[in-house]
Amino acid sequence: MGETDIEINEAKKLLESYGIYGAELGDSGVFDVTPGYYRQVSVEEEVGPEETAYLLPDKPLYILSDVRATFLPCIFGFEPWCWVTKYKDPVIDYVINATRVKDVDVYLLRGRITGKIETNFENKSEEGERWEENVKTGEQRNREKVKGSADLDGVFDEIIHLKDINKTLSELKDRIINETKPDYKITIESNFEKKGYIDMIKSILSLLLRGKIYVDDKIEVTVKWSWRGERKKQTKNIKIRAYLPVKNVHWHMW
């Protein structure tokens, strides 16, 4: 037996404490769990500065009209070179947090719990803008949103810590955020695994079977976007205290 293996009689007693009788080696079943609801208790954020990750290989010549206006005199305001291109930077805003635990498998004789964690990423950014402005008169024309300027992608690490028993349920590394447009939300599904002795398994299982767990959800996320020929990035550290619903908990007598 491995160092975290559990005796079959201990496993049977554990199941019986939840009203499951007669389980034998090799059996499987489902715990009766009513999922709770997601609820945030508190949120803390540390937002890093916006940085240039690298120049894009096909950087547009955004400054061409500005250069022309600089070296050619604009006297009356109607000369073609009086018009320069102006920009308003995109407003980068996003939220990310774990939303639930699901599809949990408890391997009683191996002291092992596996499952899935769903993390939502929502892009709340506003696209940048571009327009032409007359340097003599201040008149503006052809104002438009710059499509794609607030599309976000990136990576994140996440730790789910069980507050009631001061144990870490999962540590997720280098999870990918696929490109997400403003006003869109995506769900990233991640696998987790926890191993331990019978007391730890009992403690974690008792929390899962409540249908919700009280956690510290710690996330370090770096997002990237493209703006004016540059690849920009920003890193944010987030600590969320929340209740995560739990859905679909299975047991296995092996």
Image: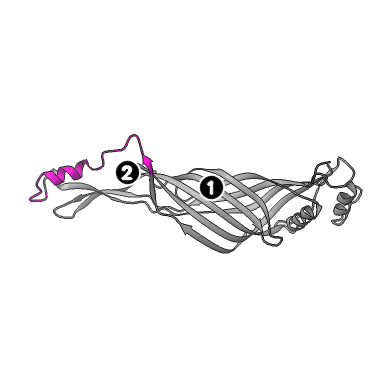
Q: How is the image coloured?
A: one colour
Q: Residue at x 33, y 34 (%)?
A: 58
> Horizontal and vertical percent for residue 101?
67, 51
Q: Is residue 45 visible?
A: yes
Q: Residue furthest top?
A: 57
Q: Considering only order in the chain, which callout, 1 or 2, is on the residue closer to the N terminus?
A: 1
Number of other residues with Cα within 10 Å of mark 2, as a class: few under 14, some 14 to 19, many 20 or more: some
Q: Is residue 191 left or right of residue 220?
A: right
Of the pair 238 and 98, the residue shown nearer to us: 238
Q: Residue furthest left?
A: 75
Figure quadrant of the C terminus: top right
Q: Is residue 21 magenta?
A: no
**Disc 2 on helix, strand or loop?**
loop
**Disc 1 on helix, strand or loop?**
strand
Q: How many marks?
A: 2
> Horizontal and vertical percent for residue 8?
88, 46
Residue that badge 2 annotates: 228
Q: Where are the magenta residues, as a range?
A: 53-77
Residue that badge 1 annotates: 156
> Horizontal and vertical percent for residue 30?
80, 48
Q: Residue furthest front?
A: 3
Q: Are marks 2 and 1 in contact (CB under 8 Å)?
A: no
- Looking at numbered disc 1 in the image, what kind of residue is underneath it? Phe
Q: Residue at x 72, y 45 (%)?
A: 114
